[in-house]
Image (cartoon, rainbow, N blue to C red):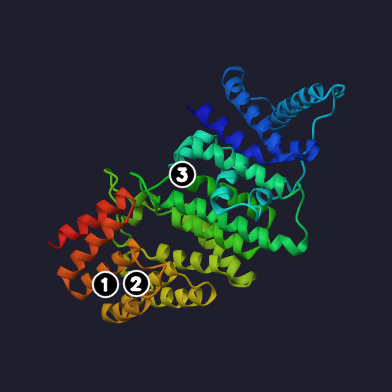
Amino acid sequence: MGLLTDIDEVLRACVPQVLAAVVRRYGDFDACEDAVQEALLAAARQWPAEGRPDDPKAWLIRVAARRRVEALRSEQARRRREALPPEPAPEVRGDDELTVLLLCCHPALSPAAQVTLTLRAVGGLTTAEIARALLVPEATVGQRISRAKQRIRQAGARFAMPGPDELGARVTAVRQVLYLIFNEGHTASSGSQLHRVELSTEAIRLTRQLRARLPDDGEVAGLLALMLLTDARRPARTRPDGALVPLAEQDRTRWDAEAIAEGIAIITDALQRFPIGPFQLQAAIAAVHDEAARPELTDWPQILRLYGMLHALTPGPMVTLNRIVALAMVDGPAVALAALDLAAGDPLLAGHHRAAAVRAHLLELAGDLSAAREEYRRAARRTLSLPERRYLESRAARLS
């Protein structure tokens, strides 16, 4: 099992540079990505039996290049042209991972297509693995990948680093895609499991690569810190039966101290060296939570200030709800309920299960247990996540 795990990690780590080298040599992202997938399958079959090669990346590049040349020769034969002469193996360059990420997050693609293509072309996940992770049919994933590659081709995208005028927006898209992948792994939006660890793990791995390529991007640093500080609490977020454990009730001795230390070091450095951005603020909030040895030691006034800054930079429904929860811990549930009433007019919050869950929590803090019970039940009916539904139903039952 250890050998297979090691091979899998090596394969996924090599994918961006292998794909980049082949695309740079032969062009046509679509066909080259297919060739790389064939090389990955060949490695998965051969390496466990024959042993891992001394240079896995070079082996994958040679096999993928050979597959692409064979396809080109076949195409030329159909067009009655001569076969291609042998060529040296494509080269690897230092900015390959970033270039592939930027291509997968091309503005011509929808967010769903960007996520899927990133997991496939950069993460090295198979179509079946992506389907399981996103809880969609394998055929749907295949269609998304195929259409995404077609859209990239139709948009005339080239395998090259975007110019300075476009790079900023593209990196912003990359950060957001990695954040979406992590969030879906940390708290699955639907299904029977709270976590999809393969997604959150992959998001952290890819964000580490992005930070290595963009060491002076404060928001990339903030994103990595946020992921580490949030994922550190995962071991305590569920009970053995899979039931959700809220933050205030978690056994904090089970949190990953090493990940917390790394995350705090990264965000502390980023806040000192770079202009403040949304991901840095979210990481700072996570750090305040993680630094509290017990729930009652949480510095809620600082969290409230940080949410106020985050709201000023990037207002949104989830920021609003989280700020209201912090407000309750500082000024009391009555003040927070009044703020929630004002926010209820936001159409993005109307009908959202988390809005009902926050109202239930505030009503429970205020002592209105009957109203809180009904709100917990309303929130449970609205969520598609079975662990969240069971948790909300248990909260309602506890108040009966």
Q: Is residue 98 left or right of residue 318?
A: right
Q: Amino acid at mark 1?
A: Leu
Provide residue 179's location: percent of width, then percent of height: 53, 56
Q: Amino acid at mark 2?
A: Val
Task: State the residue position of label 1.
Answer: 362
Q: Amino acid at mark 3?
A: Leu
Residue neighbourhood size for the residue with mark 3, other residues' Cα within 10 Å, grouped as few (<14), some (14–19), many (≥20): many
Tell me the residue at 58%/53% (across/down). 110
Q: Is residue 96 left or right of residue 196?
A: right
Quarter of image, res 340: bottom left
Q: Are marks 2 and 3 in contact (CB under 8 Å)?
A: no
- Name the one closer to the observer, 214 or 386: 386
- The tag earlier along the polypeptide, 2 or 1, is 2
Position of residue 180 relative to residue 304, above or below, is above
Q: Are marks 2 and 1 in contact (CB under 8 Å)?
A: yes
- Label 3 secondary element: helix
The label on residue 325 is 2
Task: State the residue position of label 3.
Answer: 134
Residue neighbourhood size for the residue with mark 2, other residues' Cα within 10 Å, grouped as few (<14), some (14–19), many (≥20): many
Look at discs 3 and 1 and give the one toward the viewer.
Answer: 3
